[in-house]
Image (tube, rainbow, N blue to C red):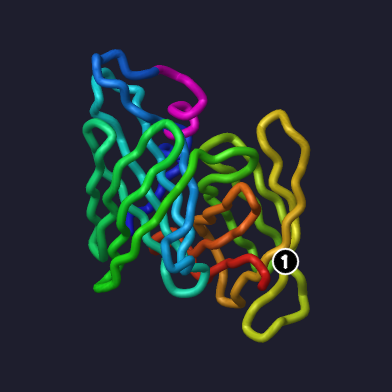
């Protein structure tokens, strides 16, 4: 899985908040879409960046089950059909103004997915986990911020984390989740508009997983 840098997050934020658009004759879709796989095992987020002219643009996707899966995909696509590989799988599909759907391959397991254009605090977050200090902080590609506190009482191999997601120009939205005791450093979180949270390590710079409490 490739590491999502701060430069990418700044670029994606610019893209989805209107720093430019496609000028070619092909009507392309941009923005952020969140959803789940057909077996509900993974959350998935897809980002379409159409700031360049024509229909060619940068595409990113991330999927996590909040337990063992943490896969990031990045590539260049043309039009509204995509098929992008990483070292462990493949994400493919089609997108329109309302939704994206296709298939996700991780290892030898392939499942379908459906994602809709995200709203409120939904999206992809880059999160810094400080287990020693008991805090989490981060931000999404659409400008929302997350801040939270990690509890001190273990729940099995997890700890409770509580905090808020705050959309740009909006009011804080509270959340509660479980974060594994081996979490530290950088994580990606997929947050659905209904506040379902799943996430995992950002490449080699982080560890551990997070999931909404069952």
Is 40 placed left or right of 90 in the picture?
A: right
Q: Is residue 151 magenta?
A: no
- Residue 80's quadrant in the figure? top left
Q: Is residue 70 visible?
A: yes
Q: Which residue is mark 1?
A: 150
- Label 1 sits on a secondary structure element that is strand
Is residue 101 shown above or below 210?
above
Is 159 placed left or right of 180 in the picture?
A: right
Q: Position of residue 61 (x, y in %)?
A: 38, 49
Q: Position of residue 138 (x, y in %)?
A: 60, 48
Q: Tell which of 204 and 157 is nearer to you.
A: 157
Residue plotted at (77% across, 37% down): 171
Q: Quadrant of the C terminus?
A: bottom right
Q: Is residue 16 magenta?
A: yes
Residue plotted at (37% across, 61% down): 71
Which residue occupies the extreme bottom position in the image? Answer: 156
Is residue 166 shown above or below 180?
above
Magenta region: 12-20
Q: Quadrant of the N terminus?
A: bottom left
Q: Position of residue 74 (x, y in %)?
A: 30, 47
Q: Position of residue 7 (x, y in %)?
A: 42, 37
Residue plotted at (44% across, 55% down): 44
Is residue 164 shown above or below 96?
below
Q: Residues within 10 Å of mark 1 (few under 14, many from 20)?
A: many
Q: Tell which of 198 and 143 is nearer to you.
A: 198
Is 145 placed left or right of 70 in the picture?
A: right
Q: Is residue 134 visible?
A: no
Residue plotted at (26% across, 65% down): 88
Is residue 76 shown above or below 90?
above
Q: How many marks?
A: 1
């Amino acid at each position: 899985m490739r590491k999502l840098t701060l430069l990418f997050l700044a670029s994606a934020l610019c893209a989805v908040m209107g720093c430019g658009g496609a000028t070619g004759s092909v009507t392309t879709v941009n923005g952020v879409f969140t959803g789940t796989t057909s077996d509900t095992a993974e959350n998935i987020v897809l980002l379409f960046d159409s700031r360049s002219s024509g229909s060619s643009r940068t595409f990113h996707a991330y999927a996590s089950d909040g337990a063992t899966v943490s896969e990031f995909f990045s590539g260049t696509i043309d039009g509204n059909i995509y098929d992008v590989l990483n070292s462990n799988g493949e994400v493919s599909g089609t997108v329109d103004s309302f939704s994206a759907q296709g298939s996700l391959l991780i290892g030898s397991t392939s499942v379908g997915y459906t994602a809709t254009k995200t709203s409120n605090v939904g999206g992809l977050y880059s999160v810094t986990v400080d287990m020693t200090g008991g805090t989490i902080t981060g931000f999404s590609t659409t400008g929302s911020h997350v801040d939270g506190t990690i509890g001190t009482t273990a729940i099995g191999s997890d700890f409770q984390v509580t905090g808020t997601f705050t959309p740009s120009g909006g009011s804080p939205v509270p959340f509660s989740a479980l974060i594994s005791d081996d979490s530290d450093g950088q994580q990606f979180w997929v947050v659905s508009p209904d506040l379902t949270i799943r996430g995992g390590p950002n490449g080699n710079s982080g560890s551990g997983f997070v999931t909404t409490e069952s």
